[in-house]
Amino acid sequence: IWAAHLNSSVPIKIKVVDADLTSAGPLAITIPNGEKDFASAPLDSTWYATSLANSLEGSELNSGEFDMDIYVNSFVDYYFGTDGLPGPGQYDFVSVFLHEIAHGLGILSLSKVENGEGSFGYVTLSSIWPLQSSFPFPVLEGLPSVWDRFIVNNTGQQLIDQALYANPSTALRTQFQSNNLYFTGPNSTAANGGTNPRMFAPASYSYGSSLQHFNESTFPLSSGNSLMTPYSSVQEVEHLPGNVLIGAL
């Protein structure tokens, strides 16, 4: 499904782990590998998922490393068929896995909230403990991801603009928890009828969910753009990325 939309001469390498994430844990977790300041990078001082960086560069920048690690929760009752017909109480694996791959393709925020302050680019391996990455986890140096550079508030202010929001700061945390953030990429905005797609930014910051999904209520299943919302329900099926997500990528 993703192959129909991706443009890369470099194979994308995914490590998949069947992991005990507990019965109360997430359906799955993706840890993307990253590169910055490579020769073909459109923006300096910005982290790109290696799957995207390799595509831009036209060669493999992370030889011998996976582009993403995807941990799949072994407690979940998954339906592994490809016909989109999960049974009662089952989660559709194809839908969930398409979602997780999207995070590894670049739908990734390097935001977090800690000690009352919001920040970009201070995520460390401890943030995902006890999970580990198969590749050396980079020192992010307080730099944003390319996804983060497209996040704006309802007045159009970029959250990565440190003249407006110091990194880290309580002001940035307030923005993260404002429930009023949007993605401002021109292609995704066009695909959304000329309106910036609303992002998931709840009043209680949720690491791994906030700022790296589209808003759940804005993009229901019936919209055809629900693949990258933060929640998936039993028997929910979405086997297409949707035009908004393709535009964002």
Image: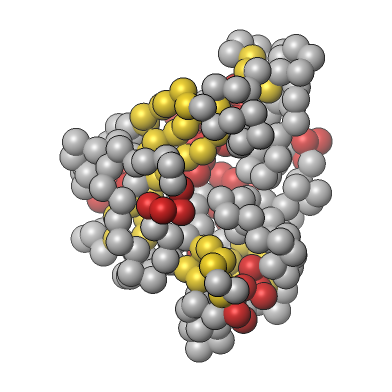
Residue found 45% across the figure and 33% down from its top: 70
Q: x, y (%) of residue 67?
A: 33, 39
Give the quadrant of residue 231: top right
Which residue of the protein is positioned furthest toward the bottom in this rendering?
163
Give the quadrant of residue 36: bottom left
Residue found 55% across the figure and 27% down from its top: 73
Residue found 75% across the figure and 12% down from its top: 87
The front one of 20 and 154 is: 20
Q: How is the image coloured?
A: secondary structure
Q: Taking 26 as reference, is 55 left or right?
A: left
The front one of 144 and 72 is: 72
Q: Is residue 93 above or below residue 54?
A: above
Q: Taking 221 as reference, is 98 left or right?
A: left
Q: x, y (%) of residue 182?
A: 66, 64
Q: Is residue 49 above or below residue 121?
A: above
> Does the rendering let one see residue 161?
no
Q: How many marks?
A: 0
Q: Taking 19 as reference, is 39 left or right?
A: left
Q: x, y (%) of residue 239?
A: 63, 26
> Does the rendering let one see residue 38?
yes
Residue found 42% across the figure and 26% down from its top: 17
Q: Is residue 44 above or below residue 104?
A: below
The front one of 164 and 136 is: 136
Q: x, y (%) of residue 246?
A: 56, 44
